[in-house]
Image (cartoon, rainbow, N blue to C red):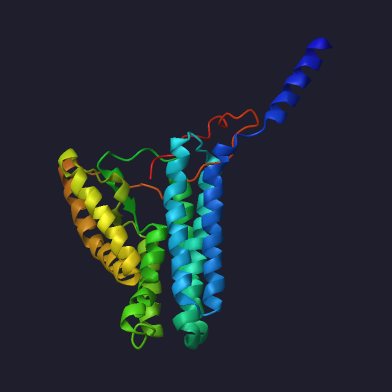
Amino acid sequence: MSRGRDRVRGLERRKLRGRAVNRLIPNALTLLALCAGLTAIRLAFLGRWELAIAAVLVAMIGDALDGRIARLMNATSEFGAQLDSLADVISFGVTPAIIIYLWAMGDAGGLGWALVLVFVMACALRLARFNVMLDDEEPAPWASRFFTGVPAPGGAALVLLPIVLSFELGEDILASPILNGFMLLAVAALMVSKVPTFSAKQFRVRPSYVGLALVGVGAFAAFLVSTPWVILSLAGLAYGASIPFAVRQYQRLQARHGATPAPVTPDPVTPGPVTPDGADEPDDNSEPDS
């Protein structure tokens, strides 16, 4: 009896200790990014297009940071990966689709809405494939430099590129339902395809170029603040133009090292909860790097 009472008291003490607040920060960051994505929809309904795009950008930054912060805090888990995927479907699937529909596709009627649905479905299918890839075998080291298809944030950036360009060039041509419908279909196809695209996380800077890289980052930040739409437009165009080069580089590496499975680098993941005693949940912390 005394042993049973001691066990119950031990469990009560563990419950009282609860979860470490700092280990919940990455999950909170994911939810804040989700809120930014949903806020972008509200801003689009109000016709405040620039603020809507800025909110999507905030969601992208949060999505880029949550998984990395989780790994630094050793707080990754399967729950976090699932939460991140669900948030990405909304922030980078539903949100950009609704923004484009309100901005340019409303006059296309049912066809415009069908194209929006295709894009959202493609985003959901891509992220479902990412969840499955978590359990697949690790790719070859060279294949981990690439994503399979366009990742969800990249797809959102490409499909929103016309509206970003319109802030500098005007809406005369860029708000065309035909142009935006083509973008929705093309990006949806790239998201579910097996076309390799560069993974920025895999790039390495040589020690001799660290100073130059830091100056470049500072210059990018300065121009982003002073001329945000020009820089974002150039970044989006550069990302789209990099896809053929990624395919060529992947084919060269594949020919050099022999046939291997397609690249399976997943989208960035987010942490999950921890057990009441503050430790990571067992067997749920083996998410691959993004």
Residue 77 drawn above or below residue 34? above
Residue displayed at 48% across by 48% down: 131
Q: Is residue 9 visible?
A: yes
Vertical side of 41 occupied by 16: above or below: above
110, 98: nearer the viewer: 98
The image shows residue 127 at horizontal and vertical percentages of 47, 54
Left or right: residue 76 versus residue 242 is right
Q: Residue at x 49, y 53 (%)?
A: 128
Task: Please give left or right for residue 177 compared with residue 272 in the image.
Answer: left
Q: Residue at x 23, y 52 (%)?
A: 215
Camera-side residue of 100 and 17: 17
Q: How many marks?
A: 0
Residue 168: image x %, image y %?
A: 32, 79
**Relative vertical location of residue 286 with respect to residue 145 in this rendering, above or below:** above
Q: Residue at x 46, y 60 (%)?
A: 58
Picture quarter with the C terminus: top left
Percent x, y of residue 36: 52, 61
- Quadrant containing the N terminus in the rendered view: top right
View extreme (right): residue = 1
Whether residue 90 is visible here, answered yes or no, is no
Q: Is residue 243 left or right of residue 82?
A: left
For residue 163, what is the image quadrant?
Answer: bottom left
Question: In the figure, residue 189 lies in which quadrant?
Answer: bottom left
- Where in the figure is residue 169, as x and y percent of width and height? 31, 82
- Above-or-below relation of 125 to 176: above
